[in-house]
Image (cartoon, grey):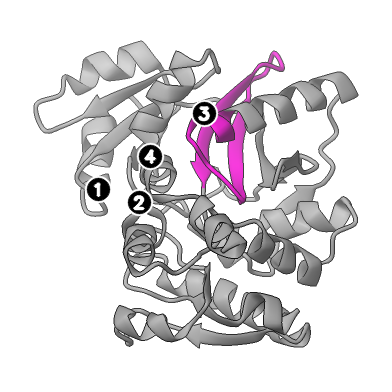
Amino acid sequence: MEQHFGKVAVLMGGISSEREVSLNSGKAVLAALQAQGIDAHAFDPAHESLDALKAFQRVFIALHGGYGENGAIQGALEIMGIPYTGSGVMASAIGMDKFRTKLIWQAVGLPVPEYAMLDAASDFDAVERRLGLPMFVKPACDGSSVGVFMVTKPGELKSAYESARRYGEVIMAEEGITGGEYTVGIVGDKALPIVKIEPATAFYDYEAKYLRDDTRYICPAELPPEKAAEIQAGAKKAFDALGCAGWGRVDFLMDAAGRHYFLEANTAPGMTSHSLVPMAAKVSGLSFEKLVLNVLSFTNSLTKQQDRE
């Protein structure tokens, strides 16, 4: 096994707003790989030159947000000719952009929440009237619910926009669909069991994801089998439409009538004790160690080409 993968760098940390989450993910991945005899080493690009990655035969990307998921690190690895886990440059860049993700999903007929792109000149009152309340305001190119604000009262949208602008330049307002929050993990060609998320907070924010112990997770989600199968197929279609590969996660919402709406894709999901892909994998019979090994095995086209040579 060690000979097959060679020397593996686990990229973690980085410089994005999700640095601490990434460090937790990376440490868990590193321990799992080392426990299985893989010659794996921690690598924090915030403190080490990317040029040092030339000493490795393969990279496990456990970076979140920013340069870890927007295609930048994937492009650097492509240029250096180093195989890496997960989606390639284009899919990573699109998946990090919630606006362009929605455009593609709409184009292939997938349901998404109503939304509006905001700037300083927006007619905030008109957006409130069109989308209704509650609504969510978020940076279009960030993750882990960083900079997400819930608008519940008329006249609050402009203030929420100004707050969200501290976390990114491109801001989106999104219809509040409050019938339930769910996610579907994807590993290889398989959609994992659906996870339902029941936060104790108003919504599944950063605190609920990483800091609280009272968020409730139900896996498999209590959905009719036909509905679950429909959503899993839709999540795989959403994943494929973006050009994603290897592994990832597609989040969706349900309304009170039981209709589902795809929300966003995550091309480098968390691998912490609170993370959802490991939770779903375990329900499907895949241990954390085997999940990590599978992710390392499902590689991009560059890796497959090198493996054949």
Residue 241, numbered circle: 3
Element type where label 1 sits in the image: helix
Element type where label 4 sits in the image: helix
Residue type at mark 2 is Gly
Mark 4 crowdedness (10 Å alpha carbons): few <14, some 14-19, many ≥20: many
Image quadrant where residue 291 sits: bottom right
Residue ID for mark 1: 163
Residue located at (37% from left, 74% from top): 14
Which of the marked residues, 4 or 2, is nearer the chain's N terminus?
A: 4
Element type where label 2 sits in the image: loop
Residue type at mark 4 is Ile
The reply to whether residue 46 is in sight is: no
Element type where label 3 sits in the image: helix
Mark 2 crowdedness (10 Å alpha carbons): few <14, some 14-19, many ≥20: many
Which of the marked residues, 3 or 2, is nearer the chain's N terminus?
A: 2
Q: Are marks 4 and 1 in contact (CB under 8 Å)?
A: no
Q: Which residues are magenta?
A: 238-266
- Above or below, 225 against 81 in this view is above
Q: Position of residue 261 (x, y in %)?
A: 58, 23
Q: Position of residue 157 (x, y in %)?
A: 27, 31
Please indicate whether residue 200 sits to the left or right of residue 192 in the image: left
Q: Are marks 4 and 2 in contact (CB under 8 Å)?
A: no
Which of the marked residues, 3 or 4, is nearer the chain's N terminus?
A: 4
Residue located at (51% from left, 28% from top): 241
Q: Nearer the viewer, mark 4 or mark 2?
A: 4
Q: Are marks 3 and 2 in contact (CB under 8 Å)?
A: no
Residue ID for mark 4: 94
The reply to whether residue 125 is in sight is: yes
Residue located at (57% from left, 33% from top): 240
